[in-house]
Image (cartoon, helix red, strand yellow):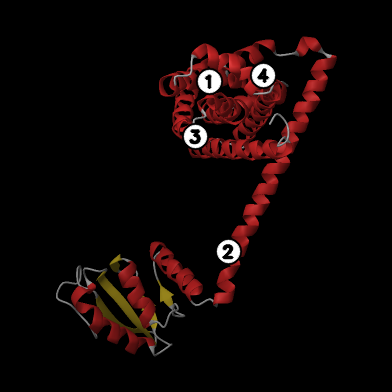
Amino acid sequence: MIEQSPDRALQPSIEERTASGRNILTLKGSWNLRGLAAEGPRLLDALQGHARDAANEWDIRDVTALDSAGAFLLWRAWGGQLPGKLHLRPEQESTFARLQNWSAISSEPISRRVEPVREHIRRIFAGAAEHFLELVSIFGQFILDVGHLMRHPRDVPWREISAAIHETGGRALGITALVGFLIGIVVSYLSSLQLQTFGAQIYIVNILGLSIIRELGPLLAAILVAGRSGSAMTARIGVMRVTQELDALEALGISRSLRLILPKVVALTIALPLLVVWTDTVALIGGAIAAHFELRVGYYQFFMSLPDAVPVANFAIGFGKGAVFGLFIALLACHFGLRIEPNTESLGNETTRSVVASITLVILIDAVFAILFREVGL
């Protein structure tokens, strides 16, 4: 016996014995940070001395406690690899497996460490392509369903569409009105400070009319609907996946695209332009109130000057934006809803992705509209 501590149950120790011509080194005690606090340096020297002889067998099954500190001490003594003859328990084997993985990564050349980064970028582009193809597939199925309903009007899910319009449009009137009213006041107040400097108070109508009807109204309504109604659509489809209702629909031979996706897409395509008009109206009212108190512009003067200051083409652009925004928000919501796996973690993750993707796409589409119609209505 080479090393022995007074209390074998607590202190780490190394026992050496010979059996059938084999030299066996048995480790006992607590090989953790607390046990190695005082014995660590001495044990490391003893371990390295024994590790020089490759014929030695190691048995660590009697070790009562082994943490990462004790495992790393043994790993260093063995020269960064497991000895050829080693007896250990399964849980100890997993500890040394983590050390092996860490050593492989740390010893890998820098040129090869870049590989995971390239692989990560490749996965990002592959995932984006997959999302795009699935979105195109959903849109194509929507077109086919519309064609089917035009040939068979009796199959139109009127109740589902009506309920979806009420949910996405009717219940969103309050929040869109509040946000639109406050935005109208803020834009009018900030603009009035600059207009007073140049004595051009009457141009407050032009600024508010163009900014709200053409840009802010559709954008605000779309972002609010994406965060409110889009997330609700994704979550509802996801819950149906978790509760296996989608599988039940398929078993009954009911088309989920016709009964779930199409009503939501049609409803939001109809409801969002109407919400845009509602948001524009409330925002202009808020702007008119702020202009009245800051610039002494009368309400009658404000609203009578509005048709001349803002060509009707701007209203058409804003209304068209609302329809396009509604179409793509609903498609994205349904797309991410169908991707949800039957567990609660996936439900939360995909709902979050749905909202982020919808808002990003709304801003992108708005930029495309601004470029395509830059010379219309100005």
Judging from the image, what secondary structure is the residue with disc 4 in?
helix
Judging from the image, what secondary structure is the residue with disc 1 in?
helix
Judging from the image, what secondary structure is the residue with disc 3 in?
helix
Can you give x and y, in whole percent of width and height, for residue 117 in the image?
58, 64
Q: The C terminus is located in which quarter?
A: top right
- Evaluate if marks 2 and 3 touch, with contact meaning CB atoms under 8 Å apart: no
Residue type for callout 2:
Val
Q: Say which residue appears at 69% left-offset and 35% top-offset.
A: 369
Residue type for callout 1:
Leu
Q: Which mark is residue 198?
A: 3
Q: Quadrant of residue 353?
A: top right
Front residue (pair 32, 320): 320
Measure the alpha-carbon separation of dots 1 and 2: 50 Å
Q: Which mark is residue 305?
A: none
Residue type for callout 3:
Phe
Q: Which mark is residue 117?
A: 2
